[in-house]
Amino acid sequence: MHRLRPAILCFLGLVLLGFVGCAASAPKSGLIRSIFVEEASGAPSTDLAQYSAVIHDTSVRVMMQRGYVAAMEPTGADAFLHVVWIARPAIAGTPQGRVTLRMTLVSRDGSVQRNLDVVSDTPAGFLSNERIADHIREKLGAIIPGPRSAP
């Protein structure tokens, strides 16, 4: 009879420890509801670097229209949208090199969910805020599905 109280306290301690483990667990990698859109990197010129704001804003709007939450901080995101400029040097006789704008959706555990070239091998001089925004709305909106609901 005198050992019943320590046994109950030990059992309750184990149950509480189990609940703490559940509360601290990371979200499942398959469930993506919030996405942190990173600033575009790798711009080979200041002309391309000026498009960083339109790339970020349009990407966030497309994600929100698809039902995702735009995470303000990377710590609160289930996934990240990496945006990178890839430049090919100018060929002799052409005024500018060609560029590609690649977007990669990466989940918190590091697995690549989607990969897409929004602007593909285009002369940098042909780009404008409007063209880049149109490409993002068209291509990013087409491949990113809405968030999966929890089972």
Image (tube, rainbow, N blue to C red):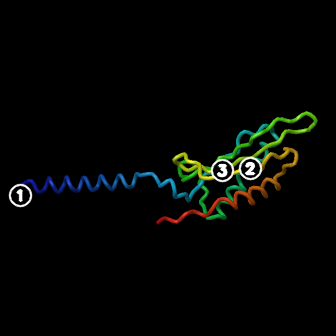
Residue at 51% of width from left, 56% of height from top? 30
Q: What number is the disc on residue 1? A: 1
Precedes in sequence: disc 1 or disc 3 = 1
Nearer to us of marks 1 and 3 is: 3
Q: Determine the secondary structure under disc 3.
A: strand
Q: Is residue 107 left or right of residue 131?
A: left
Q: Which residue is mark 3?
A: 115
Left/right placement of residue 12 relative to residue 129 reads left
SS type, badge 2: helix
Residue type at tag 1: Met
Q: Quadrant of residue 130?
A: bottom right
- The kind of residue on which mark 3 rests is Asn
Residue located 35% across and 52% down the image: 21
Q: CA distance from mark 2 to mark 1?
A: 71 Å
Q: Which residue is mark 2?
A: 53
Q: Secondary structure at mark 1?
A: loop
Residue 96 located left or right of residue 32: right
For image coordinates 77% across by 50% down, the residue present is 119
